[in-house]
């Protein structure tokens, strides 16, 4: 170790020897020299460590164990430029080892390195400083440190360095950073697009590949794509694709093109200079699955426009896609299914896919082990079968409906949604519907009803509605426990989910037992609340409400005060009076039971009414009230059979008239008015049939139950209006 020395026996003097540099012969000695105050020794020690570290990972780990990292991290900020340079060289080489990298992350050296990137003009320091950061930046914490310490600006600047190693290292760091959203935005905002585009012309393939991978990430952002297009980046990519000398770059360039084609502006550019034709050529590139897959992705993006779908159809793209559905590579098949889904919005393409035998090939994808392929296949089938009978039967003949039913219990929401949509499209045809039902589709749809995914709910409720083609199908949902989750969806605030659910409730409510069960689960209360809401009310919610009430005419009359001529009263009907506000609505049996049980409470309210009458709407002046009270007392029930009432008023007469009219088949309504009043409307023909045998239009009459009971008042006349309002 070089130092100033003197003999012990000599007396100290003012003159001293110059520093004596000594080269260490062991790594441990060299590491100790890193603490020397002599700059020459530090320069040589750092150089020796760099040389030793270059021997391999074993040497790097050995130096780590000897404690070389901390002094090296201090020396990269040394005042002497050569010391800094050699320290960076040693640190950069050591950082390529995983153990060393982990140790460096704990030391928090990143801010020190970034600081030197901004200030130094030494290319060697740039090279090894960026080499060190390239190793560290695979770690999330380090990426955050680089971003937070403003590391991106100097790194973007170094992309234009004359040294290819500096370019490569800086590019690798940026590539690692742009895996995160905030860095992707920052690269564009800091002007990183132009230098990246320049690197596409590099003489070094590794730089070109890294550049394209970086562009793949940053062009997922719309604003970045706009900047990329303004810098003519899209045209430069097309130039690469048109150049056979750059064939090794085509796969990655196509991926960037696919990102750019998410924007309509770039789609317009693809038509220039034969870009679309070139994409079609890539589809048939033999033994190059990555290129084929990325080219198909580009086709999918182009096909988002109806005009472009027409152009692709004219290029006979369907034939190529059907061929790609049969290749061995899963990625190509997946991309092909996605393109089929996009092209299926073009009606002629649907027919061509079917005629070319593409549908059985897509159905085969449903059984793949690849989730991505299964998902893409279900999306393609959903689009192919939408409003297309022939495609639906092609899927049916290929056995696709059996697999789709099985996929309803899958864990991927998008696949479940697509499967439900496809089954719903197919079930619109009776033969297919019966087969779908025979494979247990309705029980399989119960679990998706409980999903939190909006599209799953939209498609599932729609599918259930289509499948409810007969009594057995509707009963099957009830047996499978599907009515409760269906009713729960009435509480959804998603417009389409709510509309579909209301329509499903309407369809399934035609079964009385299903309607009763849905009422038990609170369907009427929820629908009543919905129909009182300005924002949530719709024709579907009103339809669902009416359908549920049609299976419980007693509740319908209590809530709406109106029974239509199609509402036929049968044994068991009761008039519980007018219901106001949100009341607990129950099925007939439970409601009847509660009325009987609550006799004493109801009787108290009758007494209150009697007291109110006695003040004057006297008791002997209301003989019907006394008569009804006597009947209730005799029966020990608030439920009085209409046949026992001999003294009553309008609502008793109207109810009796409705019962009799329904028995003999006369079209008759029952309408509740104010103040215990009610009336009936009937439809009658006024004269004999015309000579040609055709019946005249029926006329509407109100039955007089007050002045001349049984006489008819023509509706909309002054007498009829007065009768309804007095």
Image (cartoon, rainbow, N blue to C red):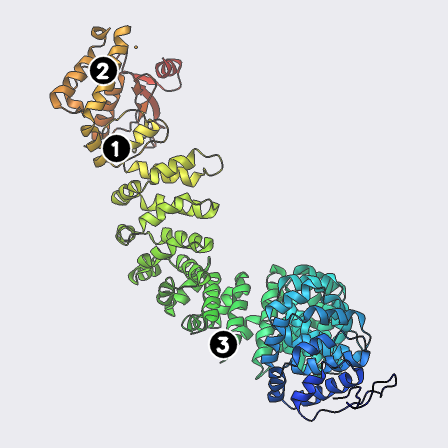
Instruction: Spot the residue most to the right.
Output: 15
**Are the residues at dot 2 and dot 3 in contact (C-beta closer than 8 Å)?**
no
| Mark closer to the observer (1, 3) | 3
The answer to which of marks 1 and 3 sits earlier in the sequence is 3
Occupied quadrant, residue 664:
top left
The residue that mark 2 highlights is 607
Residue 670 horizontal side relative to residue 363, left or right: left
**Looking at the picture, does residue 194 appear above or below residue 63?**
above
The residue that mark 3 highlights is 330
Q: Residues within 10 Å of mark 1 (few under 14, many from 20)?
A: some
Q: Where does residue 683 sit, x and y in percent of width and height? A: 32, 26
Task: Give the residue at x 53% y 67%.
Answer: 338
Task: Give the residue at x 55% y 61%.
Answer: 346
In which quadrant is the N terminus drawn? bottom right
Q: Residue 21 versus residue 387: which sits nearer the camera?
A: 21
Disc 3 element: helix
The answer to which of marks 1 and 2 sits earlier in the sequence is 1
In which quadrant is the C terminus drawn? top left
Instruction: Spot the residue most to the bottom.
Output: 25
Occupied quadrant, residue 165:
bottom right
State the CA–CA distance, disc 1 to disc 3. 61 Å
Q: Where does residue 296 sit, x and y in percent of width and height? A: 58, 72
The answer to which of marks 2 and 3 sits earlier in the sequence is 3
Residue 674 visible in rendering: yes
- Badge count: 3
Disc 1 element: loop
The residue that mark 1 highlights is 568
């Amino acid at each position: 170790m070089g130092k100033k020395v003197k003999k012990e026996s000599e007396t100290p003097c003012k003159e001293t020897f110059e520093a004596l540099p000594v080269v260490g012969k062991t790594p441990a000695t060299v590491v100790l020299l890193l603490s020397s105050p002599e700059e020459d020794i530090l320069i040589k020690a750092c150089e020796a460590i760099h040389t030793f570290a270059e021997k391999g990972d074993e040497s790097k780990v050995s130096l780590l164990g000897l404690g070389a990292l901390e002094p090296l991290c201090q020396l990269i900020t040394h005042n002497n430029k050569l010391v800094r340079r050699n320290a960076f060289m040693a640190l950069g080489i050591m950082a390529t080892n995983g153990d060393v990298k982990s140790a460096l992350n704990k030391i928090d050296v990143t801010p020190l390195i970034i600081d030197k990137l901004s200030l130094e003009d030494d290319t060697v320091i740039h090279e090894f400083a960026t080499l060190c950061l390239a190793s560290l930046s695979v770690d999330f914490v380090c990426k955050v440190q680089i971003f937070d310490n403003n590391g991106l600006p100097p790194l973007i600047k170094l992309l234009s360095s004359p040294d290819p190693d500096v370019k490569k290292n800086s590019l690798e760091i940026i590539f690692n950073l742009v895996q995160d959203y905030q860095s992707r935005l920052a690269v564009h905002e800091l002007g990183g697009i132009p230098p990246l585009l320049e690197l596409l012309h590099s003489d070094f393939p590794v730089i070109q590949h890294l550049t394209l991978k970086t562009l793949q990430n940053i062009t997922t952002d719309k604003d970045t794509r706009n900047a990329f297009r303004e810098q003519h980046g899209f045209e430069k990519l097309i130039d690469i694709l048109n150049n056979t000398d750059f064939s090794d770059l085509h796969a990655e360039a196509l991926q960037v093109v696919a990102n750019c084609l998410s924007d309509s502006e770039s789609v317009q550019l693809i038509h220039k200079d034969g870009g679309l034709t070139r994409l079609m050529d890539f589809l048939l590139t033999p033994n190059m699955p990555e290129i084929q897959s990325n080219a198909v992705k580009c086709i999918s993006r182009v096909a988002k426009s109806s005009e472009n779908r027409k152009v692709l159809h004219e290029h006979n793209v369907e034939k190529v896609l059907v061929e790609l559905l049969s290749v061995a590579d899963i990625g190509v098949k997946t991309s092909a299914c996605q393109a089929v889904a996009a092209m299926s919005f073009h009606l002629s393409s649907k027919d061509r896919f079917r005629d070319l035998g593409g549908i059985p090939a897509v159905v085969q994808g449903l059984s793949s082990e690849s989730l991505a392929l299964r998902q893409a296949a279900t999306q393609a089938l959903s689009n192919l079968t939408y409003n297309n009978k022939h495609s639906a039967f092609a899927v049916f003949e290929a056995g696709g409906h059996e697999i789709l039913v099985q996929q309803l219990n899958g864990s991927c929401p998008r696949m479940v949604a697509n499967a439900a949509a496809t089954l719903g499209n197919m079930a619109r045809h009776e033969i297919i519907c019966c087969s779908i039902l025979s494979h247990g589709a309705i029980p399989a749809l119960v679990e998706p009803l409980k999903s939190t995914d909006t599209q799953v709910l939209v498609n599932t409720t729609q599918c259930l509605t289509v499948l409810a083609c007969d009594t057995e199908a509707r009963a099957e949902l009830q047996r499978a426990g599907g009515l409760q989750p269906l009713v729960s969806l009435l509480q959804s605030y998603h417009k389409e989910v709510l509309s579909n659910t209301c329509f499903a409730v309407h369809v399934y409510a035609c079964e009385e037992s299903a309607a009763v069960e849905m009422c038990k689960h609170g369907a009427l209360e929820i629908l009543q609340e919905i129909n009182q809401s300005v924002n949530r009310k719709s024709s579907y919610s009103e339809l669902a409400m009416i359908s549920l009430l049609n299976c419980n005419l007693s509740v319908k009359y209590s809530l709406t005060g109106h029974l239509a001529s199609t509402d036929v009263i049968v044994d068991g009907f009761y008039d519980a009076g007018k219901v106001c506000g949100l009341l607990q609505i129950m099925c007939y049996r439970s409601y009847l039971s509660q009325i009987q049980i609550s006799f004493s409470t109801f009787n108290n309210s009758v007494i209150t009414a009697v007291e109110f009458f006695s003040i004057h709407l006297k008791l002997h002046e209301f003989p019907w009230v006394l008569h009804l009270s006597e009947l209730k007392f005799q029966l020990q029930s608030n439920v009085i059979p209409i046949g026992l009432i001999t003294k009553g008023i309008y609502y008793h007469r109207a109810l009796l008239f409705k019962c009799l009219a329904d028995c003999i088949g006369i079209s008759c309504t029952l309408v509740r008015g104010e103040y215990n009043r009610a009336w009936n409307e009937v439809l009658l023909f006024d004269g004999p049939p015309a000579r040609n045998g055709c019946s005249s239009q029926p006329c509407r009459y109100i039955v007089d139950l007050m002045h001349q009971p049984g006489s008819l008042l023509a509706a909309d006349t002054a007498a009829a209006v007065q009768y309804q309002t007095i």
